[in-house]
Image (cartoon, rainbow, N blue to C red):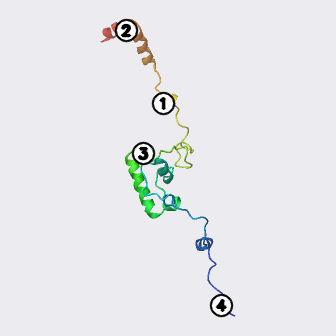
Amino acid sequence: MPPPSRKRPPSKAADQRNRQGRGKPKVCVFCADRATWVDYKDTNVLRRFISDRGKIRSRGNTGTCAQHQREVAVAIKTARELALLPYAVRTLAADKPGGRGRGSGPRGGPRPSADDAAPRATEETARVSEDAATDGAGVEDVVETV
């Protein structure tokens, strides 16, 4: 009787790596259109190669060939310098899940509203404003006390 095999069975990830035919391969848009160059002024085309955060997407995501990927990167960088495309896109904190709290945890508590941030009128500021509203009667009081 032969000794038992000590080899592990292949993992699921290794199975997927060895498997051929992951579906339809991506085709370079510029090669399909037989474009001679990538135009930096055509921002609608270039936006397809930029992520929602403003980063240049990789070849694996876009399906461009190596030559056109280099040209797309140069065109995006040129368009950014000329302010045709943004360097980075601002995202709101409410859009992002998770994070480091900012008022959602037990220690954070609610954020102050706009009413709380406004300075409140005290008795002194109210009295000064009343004196200013009179016809100069408050000026004599100030002069006498000085």
| Mark 1 and mark 2: Cα distance apart in space | 31 Å
| Pointer 1 residue | 117
Point 50% across, 45% down: residue? 91
| Mark 2 and mark 4: Cα distance apart in space | 109 Å
Secondary-structure class at tag 4: loop
| Mark 3 and mark 1: Cα distance apart in space | 38 Å
Residue type pointed to by label 3? Leu
Point 52% across, 28% down: residue? 115
Secondary-structure class at tag 2: helix
Foreground label between 3 and 2: 3
How crowded is the residue under tag 4: few (<14 C-alpha within 10 Å), some, or many (20+)? few
Secondary-structure class at tag 3: loop
Among numbered discs 4 and 1, the one appearing first in the sequence: 4
| Pointer 3 residue | 84
Foreground label between 1 and 2: 1
Among numbered discs 2 and 4, the one appearing first in the sequence: 4
Asked if 83 appears above or below 124 in the picture, the reply is: below
| Pointer 2 residue | 138
